[in-house]
Amino acid sequence: MFAATVAVTSTASAGTTLGTSAAEQGRYFGAAVAANKLSDATYVGILNREFNMVTPENEMKWDATEPSQGQFTYTNADRIVSHAQTNGMRVRGHALTWHSQQPGWAQNISGSALRQAMVNHITQVVTHYRGKIYAWDVVNEAFADGGSGGRRDSNLQRTGNDWIEVAFRTARAADPGARLCYNDYNTDGQNAKSNAVYAVVQDFKARGVPIDCVGFQSHFNTASPVPGDYQANLQRFANLGVDVQITELDIEGSGTTQADNYGRVVRACLAVSRCTGITVWGIRDTDSWRASGTPLLFDGSGNKKPRTPRSSTP
Ligand code: XIL
């Protein structure tokens, strides 16, 4: 498979799965998991064989964990965490704050009421999972697309520019052992948006605001290909003193082109010592949020897609 593309070149005993190949390189290979698929034997078979990190695809989002204000439901998220623990996988928590997939009640409040609700949400959820989470996506997608380099307008942003800092401090207080990440898309290469994230990470490190990692979603397709400066971008963030992680990888396409692109991503992570792992956003193509783009590593029947032959790896 793709992780082995590189692993076999440098180790005598190459792993035979994504997870074991990554582990040989001191890294993890994860997948986004949906609780309602844990009864699908083919799905679970691949998950347990190939992966050593899981991210709940939707089950830890605000609308899922706090559907009514102050009333927390963890059933589906707990199911995924328990499956992970039973099978020796770690968990990336996703996502404590986001402009999307908020419960209706949160969408209907603002200002200090929303800020207080955000703080309580983070405190409750992180405390519930204290000691069980490798890394939390504390803040997801807070920056605007395009060339502005500004924040995304959202109800959370309108509570005050310090909301990101407050979110990270709150998460740290609730679980000092979890790595705390900022996560976004269209930040995979060097551009105005990633420059803006870079400036915030630099500022947080300088002022002692707790941040441990930056997640690069890496949803790629023809319109948004793997950037030529992907590795350089990961490296510049790592140089700030944070880990970097590829958090939601999927690459639309098929055949050799798709395999080559996966190979590029794996090699970029392996070339950056603080790139601690890769998570793909689903298991089979049919599990993907973008299923029509067949963007994942296993086809709809659960077969591994062919890796690129080493002789033709660019
Ligand atoms: C997606 C899920 O895959 C879908 O099932 C859901 O309907 C919408 O959200 N960025 C993120 C992820 O951070 O949480 C999103 O996941 C994909 C884009």
Image (cartoon, rainbow, N blue to C red):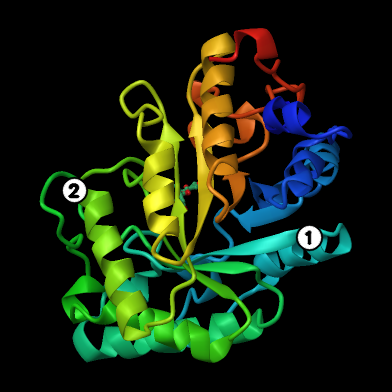
Q: Establish if 304 lies above or below 16.
A: above
Label 1: few (<14), some or many (≥20) within 10 Å? Answer: many
Which label lies toward us, 2 or 1?
2
- Element under disc 1: helix
Q: Position of residue 222 (x, y in %)?
A: 36, 20
Q: Position of residue 273 (x, y in %)?
A: 57, 51
Residue matched to label 2: 192
Disc assigned to residue 229: none
Quarter occupied by residue 93: bottom right
Q: Which mark is first along the chain, 1 or 2?
A: 1
Is residue 281 among what the camera can see?
no
Quarter occupied by residue 209: bottom left
Compared across the picture, whether 269 is left or right of 85 comes to left
Q: Residue visible at 32% across and 43% down?
A: 186
Q: Residue visible at 69% across and 33% down?
A: 3
Compared across the picture, whether 269 is left or right of 218 comes to right
State whether label 2 is within 8 Å of ligand 1. no
